[in-house]
Amino acid sequence: MALATSFGPGVLGRLDGSVKRSGAVTRRNISALRSAYWLVVISGFFEPLLYLLSIGVGVGGLVNKMALPDGRLVDYAVFVAPSMLASSAMSGALAETTFNFFGKMKFMKLYDGVLATPVRPMEVALGELTWAMIRGSLYSAAFLVIMVVMGLTSAGWALLAFPASLLVGLSFGGLGMALSTFLTSWQDFDVLGTLQFALFLFSGTFAPVSSYPEAVRLLIEATPLYHAVELIRGLTTGSPHPVLIGHAAYLVVMGILGLAVAGRRMGRLLLK
Amino acid sequence: MSPFRRPRPAPDQVTGPVGATGGAQAPDAPMIHARGLVKRFGDFTAVNGIDVDVARGESFGFLGPNGAGKSSTMRMIGCVSQPTGGVLRILGMDPRRQGTGIRARLGVCPQQDSLDPELSVKENLVSYARFFGIPRRVAKAKADELLEFVQLTERADSKVEPLSGGMKRRLTIARALVNDPDIVLLDEPTTGLDPQARHLVWERLFRLKQQGVTLVLTTHYMDEAEQLCDRLVVMDGGKIVAEDSPRALIERYSTREVVELRFGAASLEDMAGKLAGLGERIEVLPDRILLYAFDGDEAAEAVTGRGLTPSGTLVRRSTLEDVFLHLTGRTLVD
């Protein structure tokens, strides 16, 4: 009997059930788009575009050509555009997995209902992360199209940068969800917002990290957006380098760790 | 039109690959079986070693004041809270290892509505059904059926927010039925509802009971327990202090009738002294005296026979409330 129980449904069967349940969590968000939530989703597209136009193109007109690591000189907009792509992948994923996830967990009490069904905490985390990725991928795709049209990258490199931007979303989504389980009030989001803005400003986004003092540079190189920006810039500027694998690995580890922490913590918080 | 199939098959079609042992359960085995069940939160013991058996098709109640351990017990049965100690089997399965399989066959109506404010009334049901792996097409048909059952068909496309408390509760009950559950858990199903809304909920729950669904509910309304429960336990301080059918509990812990006596501004303690010897038992409440007797009218006459003139006399049948007062030694404080 015990054997039949443990092996009867099979590992694949279990996995299938798990994937379906995560999928149902993702699908719930698509149903929710019919509410005012779609406005929130659309707005995420404009932010990086406005930055690109104002700073990349506007301020870029006043700035000299930038030197890439491989020595090539490019327009400032070419240098800034991948930063905006990485930042928007980050902020899209964080918006979904911090503000919205926290709201659903603590304020709407949504998961109290969900966890009374066969769905497990980790499946909720996976389902929400998948949704954050879908949302982020739409922004990234649209932004990459704009970059190609503006001549800031080539179509081929844009195709490679797209999965990289998904990885950035996955990574920050995992981080955001894990952070959310530690937040207790809406006030905590102010702190989070400030940290996020600091990352946005200093992660080699608007100026190369080599222009900072040594200590600051080391600090920045330990933070996640730096690796996201470097990975994506390496691709959109057409300068692949083995170092990019290191940046990607950093993001993979952060995503997996975040997801694992989030699943565990959700179980602890909601299944007392 | 019944939204439920009878007799209930083992609903493996909605459970997916988990819970394979559930179908192997003997037909007369208890749906819920607990021995020495304990739940502790740090130093606080919410549930202190209770024994419970709930049979198939039974309507079972946990009665008790706030903090008695009812909700903690319900959360353990619902497999969203791990027991700290003791034995717990639900549908023959172990919640520690087979939580997913058990939850697939439960319907849960929590104390606080956890409806999805971003979805319509109908989408709330469809989306919830998807968590059980029910295909969307089937879920939509089921949602229509259930909205009919809880009389919310006209609000199908409405948002959840504008619904009244009673409507939200009915929607939550409908949501608890999307997977054709073997057991429906209802945690204080009518708390906070106005009398009309309460009666509508009771009526729907009674229909479920008639259809043979196993109902497990908590309440601190005595009339609710009398209406809905075949059998109940009274909990106090995490322990079970009595267990039986409502009728049998009333017979054992109360008398057939109760006379409620009011004496205006007079000292009730003094009056109680003068009533000594009448009926089987006398209880002094802050505002009235309860005189427990087999024949209430006879007892009331004996009161006036002693020359006492109550400002108000009410002879009524004994209720669970009287049992409750007797067992827990206090009035309900919410």
Image: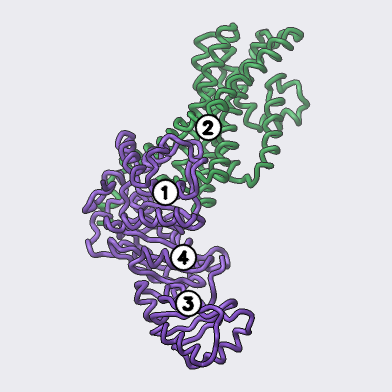
Disc 4: CA contacts within 10 A as few (<14), some (14-19) or many (>=20): some
Most distant residue in the right direction? A213
Kind of residue sitting beneath label 4: Tyr
Q: In front here: B128 or B192?
A: B192
At label 2, the amino acid type is: Val
Query: Which chain contains the residue that carries disc 2?
Result: A
Of residues A97 and A211, the one drawn nearer to the viewer in this rendering: A97
Q: CA distance from mark 1 to mark 4?
A: 18 Å
The residue carrying mark 2 is A252
Alpha carbon separation for disc pair 2 and 1: 45 Å
In the rendered image, residues at marks 2 and 1 fall on the same chain = no
Indicate whether A244 appears above or below B23. Answer: above
Question: Do the CB atoms of the residues marked 1 and 4 lie less than 8 Å apart?
Answer: no
Q: CA distance from mark 3 to mark 4?
A: 21 Å
Q: Residue at x 37, y 39 (%)?
A: B153
> Residue beneath label 1, please?
B170
First-in-chain label (1 vs 4): 1
**Residue neighbourhood size for the residue with mark 2, other residues' Cα within 10 Å, grouped as few (<14), some (14–19), many (≥20):** some
Chain coloured green in the rendered structure: A
The quarter of the picture where the N terminus of chain A appears is: bottom left
Q: Is residue B267 left or right of residue B235?
A: right
Dots 3 and 4 on the same chain: yes
Check disc 4 and report the residue beneath it: B221
Question: The residue marked by circle 3 belongs to what chain?
Answer: B
Closer to the camera in the image, A182 or B179: B179
Residue A119 picture location, percent across and down? 41, 45
Q: Chain of mark 1?
A: B
Disc 4 is attached to a residue of which chain?
A: B
Q: How dense is the environment of label 3, judged by Cα within 10 Å: few (below 14), some, or many (20 and up)?
A: some
Side of B86 where A261 appears, left or right: right
Residue for badge 3: B314
